[in-house]
Image (spheres, rainbow, N blue to C red):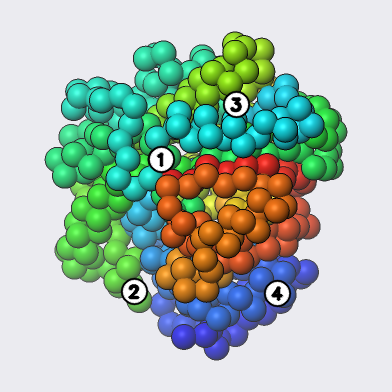
């Protein structure tokens, strides 16, 4: 049902739902959007879900909806909510989502668009064969249960130790590619059985591997620090998550949290926000399981990065390091992190839920790698298939406005079901090829579901982030070819 409640404009691209709008709200709702993006949010449950999040026990400052916000499960996708660890703050699987640590990483290369374009089709075909993808696909290697547990504990670092990557890769990942609270004992056998064959696979839906080129550089100094030296430079973007493993973890703990709501007498306006105090047994168990799924996803992207480098090696018959293929950064989209933030002049320990949201820490933050501390965190905003993507940089304003967060991509305006009804995969692929963009996918259905028209305008989403000041433009990327599950 479309949102009918109050929405006060604070300044350009900043709106607020007052705390008095609905009984039980503990903080206002804060929305960052252009007028056009805001109208789209009003058409579904996005803003209603923002209001619901504002009811969570221990929530601090605002319930936040970012410019790519759209209706999700519990939280809106593009939602941020932070609860106080020490004042009864809850932790909610609905604030993380089913695809735990769905995220994106970006690699720079020494290649130029003009030299890749003539052989793009063959190169993509090689990558399509090298990187396993699709719903039912299994990885190139088989992991024992013991090895899976090691991956759940170690994430990127474990994958690199097994020979799948370079030592520097971990330093260029959010949280260095692993969360320390992971405990495989908190994972069900069903989740492990689903995850075991899928580690090292791209997956389906909006997950992709994309070859891009730099269309425009906005900030040459920061771009160069990130490895971007010139327009026309080729980059590689990888977008995937924790696959069926993370989905099962979420499903398992939603049932746990539904019981916890009754046990702890927590009042919530929507059962999809089922939660438990973060310091309770249920809260700690979920946090440990979620960390396992996050580490699974980081390891997953690391394996795919290794096979991308192998694919380039096969095609160019050159060592990957001579082609660059260096990791700029890897960010998580669906995660809950324990972080310290300043609220009303006091530093507090918070459970920061980011659901379809990207961390965007500014220069000087202690969690950044040494080479990025003077600059700020790389922020990667992937577009929809066939549209631009952006590389941005986290800013100080994000710490004040959004708990160091910004949008995670374009955001859907059309469900996958509606997209399949409206678009034909073969036609979408043909239209993209006429524009010089090659698409490899396991089925035309996936292409139809991910048609560019099913998503918001990434240019508007990125511009709001830049104009509000939570993440600033570094460069704009254009797709050359896409591999989808």
**Mark 4–mark 3 distance (CA, rounded to whole Å):** 34 Å
- Name the mark on residue 152: none
Q: Which of marks 2 and 3 is nearer the N terminus?
A: 2
Check disc 4: other Cα within 10 Å, few if <14, some if 14-19, many if 20+.
few
Rendered view: 201 above or below 386? above
Q: Where is residue 10 in the image (x, y as percent from the top left)?
A: 72, 72
User: To which residue does mark 1 refer?
Assistant: 133
Counting residues from the N terminus, which is met first, the one under dot 4 or under dot 2?
Answer: 4
Q: Determine which residue is flagged by label 2.
A: 270
Marked residue nearer the N-terminal end (3 or 1):
1
Residue at which label 3 appears: 327
Tags 3 and 1 touching, CB below 8 Å: no
Residue 382 x, y percent position in the rendering: 61, 48
The picture places residue 278, in percent across and down from the top left corner, at 32, 50
Q: Which of 357 and 266 is in front in this view?
A: 357
Kindly state the secondary structure of the residue where label 1 is placed: loop
Camera-nearest residue between 428 and 50: 428
- 10 Å crowding of disc 1: few (<14), some (14-19), many (20+): many
Residue marked by disc 4:
36
Q: Residue at x 53, y 69 (%)?
A: 423
Alpha-carbon span between mark 2 and mark 3:
40 Å
Q: Nearer the viewer, mark 3 or mark 1?
A: 1
């Amino acid at each position: 049902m479309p949102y009918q409640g109050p929405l006060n404009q604070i300044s350009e691209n900043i709106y607020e739902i007052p705390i008095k709008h609905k009984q039980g709200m503990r903080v206002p709702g804060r929305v960052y959007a252009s007028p056009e993006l805001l109208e789209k949010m009003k058409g579904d449950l996005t803003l209603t879900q923002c209001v619901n999040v504002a009811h969570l026990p221990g929530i601090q400052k605002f319930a936040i909806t970012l410019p790519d916000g759209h209706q999700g499960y519990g939280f809106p996708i593009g939602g941020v909510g932070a609860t106080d660890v020490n004042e009864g703050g809850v932790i909610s699987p609905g604030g993380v989502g089913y695809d735990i640590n769905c995220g994106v990483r970006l690699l720079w290369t020494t290649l130029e668009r003009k030299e890749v374009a003539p052989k793009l089709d063959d190169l993509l075909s090689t990558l399509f064969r090298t990187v396993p993808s699709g719903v039912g696909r299994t990885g190139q290697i088989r992991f024992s249960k013991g090895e899976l547990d090691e991956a759940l504990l170690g994430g990127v670092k474990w994958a690199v130790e097994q020979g799948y990557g370079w030592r520097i890769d971990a330093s260029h990942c959010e949280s260095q590619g692993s969360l320390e609270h992971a405990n495989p004992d908190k994972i069900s056998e069903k989740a492990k059985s689903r995850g075991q064959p899928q580690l090292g696979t791209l997956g389906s839906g909006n997950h992709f591997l994309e070859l891009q080129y730099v269309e425009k550089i906005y900030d040459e100094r920061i771009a160069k620090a990130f490895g971007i030296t010139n327009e026309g430079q080729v980059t590689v973007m990888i977008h995937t998550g924790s696959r069926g493993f993370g989905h099962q973890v979420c499903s398992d703990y939603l049932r746990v949290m539904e019981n916890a709501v009754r046990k702890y007498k927590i009042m919530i306006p929507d059962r999809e926000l089922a939660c438990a105090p973060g310091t309770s047994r249920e809260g700690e168990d979920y946090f440990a399981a979620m960390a396992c799924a996050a580490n699974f996803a980081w390891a997953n992207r690391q394996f795919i990065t290794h096979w991308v480098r192998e694919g380039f090696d096969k095609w160019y018959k050159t060592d990957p390091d001579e082609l660059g293929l260096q990791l700029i950064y890897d960010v998580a989209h669906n995660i809950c992190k324990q972080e310290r933030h300043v609220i009303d002049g006091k530093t507090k320990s918070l459970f920061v839920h980011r659901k379809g949201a990207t961390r965007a820490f500014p220069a000087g933050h202690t969690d950044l790698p040494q080479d990025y501390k003077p600059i700020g965190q790389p922020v990667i905003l992937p577009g929809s298939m066939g549209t631009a993507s952006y590389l941005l940089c986290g800013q100080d304003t994000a710490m004040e406005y959004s708990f160091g967060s910004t949008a995670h991509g374009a955001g859907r305006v059309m469900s996958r079901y509606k997209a399949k009804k409206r678009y034909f995969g073969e036609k979408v692929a043909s239209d993209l090829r006429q524009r010089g963009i090659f698409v490899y996918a396991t089925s035309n259905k996936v292409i139809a579901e991910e048609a560019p028209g099913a998503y918001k305008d990434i240019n508007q989403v990125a511009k709001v982030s830049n104009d509000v000041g939570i993440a600033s433009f570094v460069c704009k990327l254009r797709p050359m070819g896409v591999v989808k599950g």
